[in-house]
Image: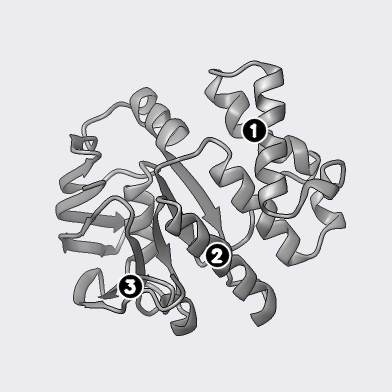
Amino acid sequence: MIIQTENIGKLFRTEDVETTALDGINISVDAGEFVSIMGPSGGGKSTLMNIMGLVDHADSGRYFFRDEDVESYDERQRAKVRRQHIGFVFQSFNLIDELTVYENVELPLVYDGRSDRRTRQEKVQAVLEKLDMAHRTKHFPQQLSGGQQQRVAVARAIVNQPELILADEPTGNLDSEHGGEVMDILAQLNNEGTTIVMVTHAPECSEYADRVVRMLDGRVIAEETVGAEYA
C-alpha cells in the first residue's frame, strides 16, 4: 500500500470563520492503482491532495506513505520524499516561463542533486522522447500549445521516475482532444506501474481510473470500482 490516511482532518481559520475542509478522511491506495477523486468545488479534494503530496499538514489524523507515518516529518524530510517519490501535475501547468522545455523538465533532477549533468541530460531526453516533445527542447512554454505545455508538465513530473503521480485537474485547461491525449499518457504510465491519484470534475477522465472516490463537504461519501476501461 502506497497511501493510507486515518481520520485526516483539516480546518481553515480566518478571524471570524472556521471552515472544515476535511472531516475524518480514510482512504487507502495500493501501489499501481489509478484512483480518481471527484466532487464539487470546495469539497476538499485539492486539500486532500496537498496533504497526500506532503505540501500541506493535516490538523488531525495520521498519514502513511509507503508504510511510513509521514505526518510527523519535518520540512526537510517531507521535501526529500516529494523529490524522490512523488510527481505533480497541475491544471495550470506551473511551468517556468523563463526556462526552456529542457530546463523545466530538468528541474526536479537538479533539486534532487543525485545525478550528474550527463545523467540528467540522458533522463530528460528520454522522457521528452517518450512524450513526443524532444523536438521542442529549446522552446519556451509560451511558444507551446496548451496540450504541449501539459505534456512538458507530465515529463517534469515523471523524469525522476516517481512511484506516485498526483494530478490535480490535469485536463482542466485543455480542449477535449488534448485532454484525451494527456489522459492516454497517464493511463500508459499507470499500465507501466506508476500509481496515480487524480482530482477531476470530468466523468470522462474518471473512466480511466480503477476506482472513483467521491467527496462532499470534506467527507468521503462513496467509492466505486470502475475497471479502467482504457487500460
Nearer the observer: mark 1 or 3; the answer is 1
Left or right of 13 in this view: 200: right
Q: Quadrant of residue 142?
A: bottom right
Element class at badge 2: loop
Label 3 packing within 10 angstroms: few (<14), some (14-19), many (20+): many
Q: Residue at x 33, y 72 (%)?
A: 43
Identify the residue under disc 1.
123
Identify the residue under disc 2.
170
Nearer the observer: mark 2 or 1; the answer is 1
Identify the residue under disc 3.
43
Front residue (pair 164, 64): 164
Instruction: Kindly report the distance in space between the C-alpha atoms of the residues bearing marks 3 and 2.
Output: 18 Å
Q: Earlier in the sequence, mark 3 or mark 2?
A: 3
Q: Is residue 28 visible?
A: yes
Q: Residue at x 84, y 49 (%)?
A: 136
Left or right of 219 in this view: 226: right
Instruction: Kindly report the distance in space between the C-alpha atoms of the residues bearing marks 1 and 3.
Output: 38 Å
Q: Residue at x 74, y 60 (%)?
A: 148
In which quadrant will I find the C terminus? bottom left
Q: Quadrant of residue 117?
A: top right
Residue 21 image position (x, y, % from top left):
28, 63
Residue 17 image position (x, y, % from top left):
29, 64
Element class at badge 3: loop
Tag 2: amino acid: Pro
Residue 116 image position (x, y, % from top left):
64, 16
